[in-house]
Image: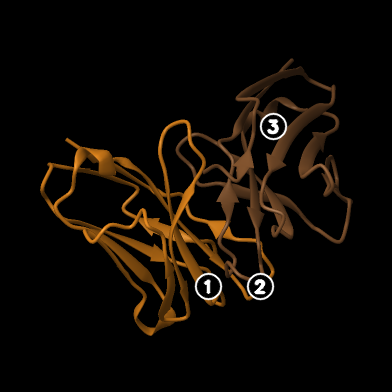
Amino acid sequence: DTGVSQNPRHKITKRGQNVTFRCDPISEHNRLYWYRQTLGQGPEFLTYFQNEAQLEKSRLLSDRFSAERPKGSFSTLEIQRTEQGDSAMYLCASSLGSTGEAFFGQGTRLTVV
Amino acid sequence: DQQVKQNSPSLSVQEGRISILNCDYTNSMFDYFLWYKKYPAEGPTFLISISSIKDKNEDGRFTVFLNKSAKHLSLHIVPSQPGDSAVYFCAASDRGSTLGRLYFGRGTQLTVWP
């Protein structure tokens, strides 16, 4: 499978716990994005990496959120002290250069109870 | 601040007919536009795109039209098929300054009935 891969697909956690999601982009893609989608909304930008450098962060990304992309390959998104408002689908996408077409993974559905 | 707007949350079309999905944007710096299709519990799938230097792009049954003066684009699906039933998202990018970041509309649920 050469598409964008995200793990886990589903995560249920108790409020206050930490969670970490992983994204494996398409191998030759140098750009990696995290988006969040809630019910009835389109995906909202969270953060962006070019290779290993995190170049942009949305104001949606509070200090409880951190993302990394070591060695410019896979990426992780960690949410500390989860809140019920963090419940959403977390989407990862990758693209090559400035072509514009971002390819999305299947997402991680987070439910905070 | 919703910079990309899809004002129709749903559209129902008979199989074989044309589906027209509409999208408006407010940021005149956007220079690249994309449509994504999304099935439940899956990530968005890229469908078709158009650069601001064009006013039309066609790929099989899918055609995207761009009217820059009106800041409006539309996706035409002809003929519509039941398998086209999904949520369609319009997205826009200012490739010069936003490094490929996409701004999405809220989506339009398309239902194609036999």
**Mark 1 or 2 closer to N-term?**
1
Depth check: give the residue in front, A27 or A92: A92
Which chain is represented by orange in the image? A
Up the image or down, A47 lies above or below B45; here it is below
Up the image or down, A95 lies above or below B27; here it is below
Instruction: Report the residue marked by disc 3.
Output: B84
Q: Of helix, strand and loop, which one carries label 1?
A: strand
Depth check: give the residue in front, B25 or B66: B25
Instruction: Report the residue marked by disc 2.
Output: A98
Question: Residue A93 location, x and y as percent?
Answer: 50, 60
User: How packed is label 1: few (under 14 Cα within 10 Å), some, or many (20 or more)?
Assistant: many
Q: Marks 2/3: CA distance? A: 28 Å
The amino acid on which the numbered mark 1 sits, given as a three-letter code, is Arg
Question: Residue B71 location, x and y as percent?
Answer: 77, 45
Q: In this view, does B69 lie to the left or right of A72?
A: right
Which chain is represented by brown in the image? B
Find out whether the residues at labels 3 and 1 contact each other: C-beta distance under 8 Å.
Answer: no
